[in-house]
Amino acid sequence: MFLDQLKTVFYLGILAIIFLIIGYALGGTTGIVIALIFALIINTVSYWYSDKLVLKIYNAKAAEYTQYTRLHDIILDVSTRASIHKPKVYIINSPTSNAFATGRNEKNSIIVVTEGLLTLLTDQELRAVIAHEIAHIKNKDLLISTVSVVIASAIAYVALIARVATLGSSDENTNPGFFELLLLTLIAPISATVLRLAISRSREYTADETGAKIIKDAESLSEALIKIENAPKIKSGNPASANLFIVNPFSGKKVMKFLSTHPSTNERVKRLRKIAFSN
């Protein structure tokens, strides 16, 4: 788990450096300052409103205790074991099976599950999935994910501005050279996306391990992941939010490992079974 934490810090650092390099290439020291201010504004907006946006995208509704007693009781039990505040509980009215956590911090955290997940999993498996999501909250992954997405998006946006500005400029003295242009418009945004996805995969491994330790049950989480992986996927929604879910919720062909939002389910199951065996 320490190695995965270290990887996250490293990847975030590289993302920040890429952003600063773009700022410097566009405007020297002033460009760096503008880039930092731009990132700060976007981070602040995302921090306060990203949870509301994602709940709206999936039309998630607050889960009433009287109707979802089983789910509420499991979340209360696991959050107590993890020594965190009980998150708010939301439901997506969908037959697909998945879950995610959102919210700007522990005190404002939300766990969202689909109707399909409640039907698909046993109590122990559902408890394991909830432990995984609570692990994301406990490990501050909600903030880390927001920051990584925002920085990567900002890099792509700044690169687009640079490309448009360069194409529209006739002043040879202000146009960047070939390698600078390549960095600004191609290498930087691609690198930022790859790093963001690497952060997402690293946080999933860590949440798996933390969640298994919270409830002292790695085997149930591995069984739940297999069931969710093999369940039907959703056909609508925003693919940019795929990294939020415990398993990628969208149908589609397999992609190269470094372009995936999640580690392969097989690899996650192998790690969890090692944990179960060692215990």
Image: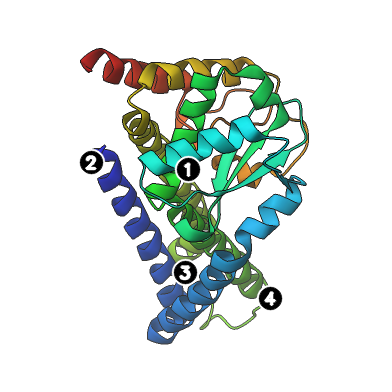
As measured in the structure, the alpha-carbon distance from the residue carrying label 4 to the one carrying label 1 is: 32 Å
Element under disc 3 = loop
User: Is residue 226 depicted above or below 113 in this figure?
Assistant: above
Nearest-to-viewer mark from 4 and 2: 2
User: Is residue 37 depicted above or below 114 in this figure?
Assistant: below
Nearest-to-viewer mark from 2 and 3: 2
Q: Which residue is mark 1?
A: 197
Which of the pair 176/258 is nearer the observer? 258
Q: Of callouts 3 and 4, which one flags the residue occurring earlier in the amino acid sequence?
A: 4
Residue type, label 2:
Phe
Residue 85 appears in the figure:
yes
Q: Which residue is mark 4?
A: 168
Q: Which residue is mark 2?
A: 2
Q: Which residue is mark 3?
A: 177
Which of the pair 207/254 is nearer the observer? 207
Residue type, label 1:
Leu
Q: Residues within 10 Å of mark 2 (few under 14, many from 20)?
A: few
Nearest-to-viewer mark from 3 and 1: 1
Left of 72 or right of it: where is 218? left
Which residue lies at the image location 23% right of the left edge and 41% below the top edge? 2
Q: Of callouts 2 and 3, which one flags the residue occurring earlier in the amino acid sequence?
A: 2
- The colour mode here is rainbow
Q: Quadrant of residue 52?
A: bottom right
Where is residue 259 drawn, in percent x and y?
51, 36
Residue 252 appears in the figure:
no
Q: Quadrant of residue 69?
A: top right
Q: Outermost residue, front direction?
A: 66
Residue type, label 3:
Gly
Nearest-to-viewer mark from 4 and 1: 1
